[in-house]
């Protein structure tokens, strides 16, 4: 099973279990920007305990849901991992948090054609806002690259007042502006 097929199987299992979800992370950045390789798929889920069992049963044999949930430090949420056999590729399922932006971006999610499906995905604006926080909190350079990529591809189509509002609230505007200038200067 390929990583793309694994993501499709997880999306199908979530849909089958009636779990509200959205793709985030590098897969969402790839849809909104310039694609890059990744060794994982990140999804935010709004799930109940029984639905986790339904998801596990719906997964093909090559995919295994870890029975033990973990606390994820960057997002501050509970995380479940689905592993693809004989591969480093994983799907990480992050519980929807009570963070105001997490709730807002989940409400704003959209359906986008990718991977032969129409999964729910975070908007480009919400990906930029989230990746600004990750770049600040975890210092990951790939998040800055993803932000520049989404700005370069989506540019004028982005809802800049929305992005600016949340970056001001999160204290990430000082990260946003240099990235915007770098894209404008290219």
Image: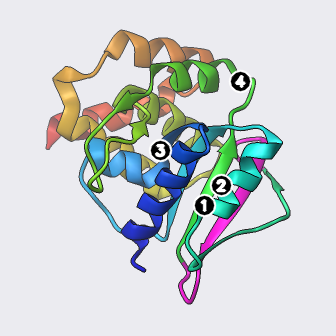
The quarter of the picture where residue 90 lies is bottom right
Measure how far apart labels 2 and 1 are at the Cα level.
5 Å
Horizontal and vertical percent position of residue 154: 21, 32
Q: What numbered label is drawn on residue 58?
A: 1
Measure how far apart labels 3 and 2 are at the Cα level.
16 Å
Task: Give the labeled residue for mark 2.
Answer: 55
Horizontal and vertical percent position of residue 173: 49, 24
Dot 4 or dot 3: first in sequence order is 3
Q: Which residues are magenta?
A: 73-88
Question: Does residue 114 appear left or right of residue 88 in this picture?
Answer: left
* Residue at screen point 24% across, 52% down: 34
Whether residue 170 is visible here, answered yes or no, is no
Dot 3 or dot 2: first in sequence order is 3
* Residue at screen point 38% across, 26% down: 125
Numbered disc 3: secondary structure: strand
Task: Give the labeled residue for mark 3.
Answer: 23
Whether residue 139 is visible here, answered yes or no, is yes
Measure how far apart labels 1 and 3 are at the Cα level.
19 Å
Q: Are marks 4 and 2 in contact (CB under 8 Å)?
A: no
């Amino acid at each position: 099973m390929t990583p793309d097929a694994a993501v499709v199987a997880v999306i199908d299992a979530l849909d089958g279990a009636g779990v509200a979800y959205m793709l985030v992370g590098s897969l969402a950045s790839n849809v909104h920007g310039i694609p890059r390789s990744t060794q994982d798929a990140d999804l935010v889920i709004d799930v109940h305990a029984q639905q986790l069992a339904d998801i596990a049963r719906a997964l093909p044999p090559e995919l295994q849901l870890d029975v033990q949930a973990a606390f994820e430090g960057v997002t501050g949420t509970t995380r479940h991992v689905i592993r693809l056999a004989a591969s480093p590729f994983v799907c990480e399922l992050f519980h929807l948090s009570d963070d105001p932006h997490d709730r807002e971006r989940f409400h704003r999610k959209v359906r986008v054609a990718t991977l032969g499906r129409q999964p729910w995905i975070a908007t480009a604006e919400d990906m930029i806002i989230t990746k600004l926080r990750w770049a600040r909190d975890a210092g990951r350079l790939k998040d800055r690259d993803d932000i520049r990529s989404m700005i370069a591809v989506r540019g004028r189509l982005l809802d800049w007042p929305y992005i600016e509002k949340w970056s001001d609230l999160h204290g990430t505007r000082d990260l946003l502006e240099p990235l915007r200038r770098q894209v404008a200067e290219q």
